[in-house]
Image (cartoon, rainbow, N blue to C red):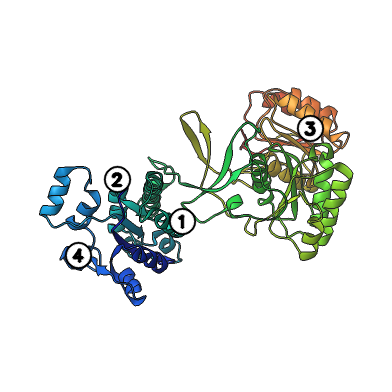
Amino acid sequence: MPKINRALLSVSDKVGVVEFARGLHDLGVALLSTGGTAKALSDAGLPVTQVSDYTGFPEMMDGRVKTLHPKIHGALLARRDNPEHMAAAKQHGIELIDMVVVNLYPFQQTVAKPGVTLEEAIENIDIGGPSMLRSAAKNHRSVAVICNPARYPALLDEMRRSGGELSAETLASLAIEAFAHTAAYDTAISGYLTHRLAPAEAAFPAVLHLRWEKVQDLRYGENPHQKAAFYRDASAAPVGLAAAKQLHGKELSFNNLLDLEAVLLPAREFTAPAAVIVKHLSPCGIATADTLVTAYGDALMCDPLSAFGGIVGLNRIVDAGAARAILDGIATYGFLEAILAPGYDPDALQMLRGKKDLRLLELPDLQAADCFDFKRVTGGAVVQDLDTAVEPPEIKVVTRAKPAPEQMASLRFAWQAVKYVKSNAILIAQGTKSVGIGGGVTSRVDATWLAVRKAEGRAQGGVLASDAFFPKSDAVQVAAEAGIAAIIQPGGSRGDEEAIALCNARGIAMVFTGQRHFRH
């Protein structure tokens, strides 16, 4: 583009703007500005022309109208290679503006404040700023549009090297960033107003606006030949893994993040000290206990072979005892990829840092969650609310044998844990620890057989949870032969009577919940 001769600066976030304006001034760029930005520049000793003096029209209506003027937008939109545009600009006294430096009223920061009123939110909806960004970005071959203060130093460096110009590649990059910025801004406003003015539509809106901000590039995707990156939901305050802080270890991989999510969801659901171990999105051990040390040991012993190379999730701050138990487990059964916990005692952190590749993540607020659970399909997505059910909607004993109180407590634990196992899902528990898990297979009888095999005799006298009903009694037969004492399942199958009859014949207690927990 030709040399930049005139720039308009109007920013809410004034970080770095004086230094940037000084650099422009040193390059011979004339400065236009508005309101508080003009004052900041003037106070810094920089010559600046007020927009109202340039347009000949005063700011009005509490600043709502100041840059919405033909002398502003004509100066931005005029095509320099179009003689008619240039003639119109000359006829109407429009002096071209070659650069716009704008960032917007802090709408998102405003609505994040406790107790903010609708009126306050509306007054923080910027109108002139987005309009200037869009006008400049549309004409980006001739106008530089800057909405990101982090780019100020690099832009000044480029202009100094080129005699006051910016390359076509830089201009295009700035325009793309500006349109992304205004799109995100409008998405935030739309989302807020929908929740405030039309809350019924907010549950599943007619148009679901998703805004994602890159956190980091990843080494690769599920496999080395796939590229990947981690994004966070930029329309809200960071929650979940997007809010986690890595304290130690190698950089996170695509698969690490998926497995970390798979331990976060169950770990945050239990109120007692809990440990979850996941491998390839499937739990291979879940336990609660009086202490984190015991919970971790119980979770590990459910399936120590599968725990090799797994991810650990904990719902308590890791103390030295828990750290020692984890290190003992690594020494005996092999390495772990990562640990996610609300925090680490200094001694525990020092001990665990002895494993140089072990990723340690800290997430103080395990409970913060997204509104939606959605999965991509070709050309779109399927969206649902989260499965937050903790207590069964009903406990209906359907057999002659009744669960003893300690069995009922174990059944509730198993029902709560099995919903995080890939369907078809079966979980066998002794007390509040899993001893056998079978999931992610295409028949329920195979899932039951796998859970029994993993339990290796520990199924005797234990309880079994199924994420969905038994279509036949074959899986119940496998459980009975393994010595299962009580079963919890949703019920509702045509085969219920057959399963109940088998339980009655074998002295097994069976409970229906009326609710299934498919996890695809």
Q: Position of residue 85 (x, y in %)?
A: 17, 46
Q: Which mark is residue 451?
A: 3
Instruction: Choose between 511 and 323: the one closer to the eye.
Output: 323
Residue at which label 4 appears: 54
Mark 2 neighbour density, 10 Å: few (under 14) some (14–19) many (20 or more): some
Badge nearest the viewer, 1 or 4:
1
Instruction: Choose between 229 and 363: the one closer to the eye.
Output: 229
Q: Position of residue 40 (x, y in %)?
A: 35, 73
Residue type at mark 3?
Ala
Judging from the image, what secondary structure is the residue with disc 4 in? helix
Residue at x 23%, y 63% (from the top left corner): 66
Sequence order check: which comes first, mark 2 or mark 4? Answer: 4
Sequence order check: which comes first, mark 1 or mark 2? Answer: 2
Mark 4 neighbour density, 10 Å: few (under 14) some (14–19) many (20 or more): some
Sequence order check: which comes first, mark 1 or mark 4? Answer: 4
Q: Which mark is residue 154?
A: 1
Tell whether label 2 touches label 1 (CB within 8 Å).
no
Residue at which label 2 appears: 138
Badge nearest the viewer, 3 or 4:
4
Sequence order check: which comes first, mark 3 or mark 4? Answer: 4
Tell whether label 2 touches label 3 (CB within 8 Å).
no
CA distance separating discs 3 and 4: 77 Å
Image quarter of the C terminus? top right
CA distance separating discs 2 and 4: 22 Å
Residue type at mark 2?
Lys
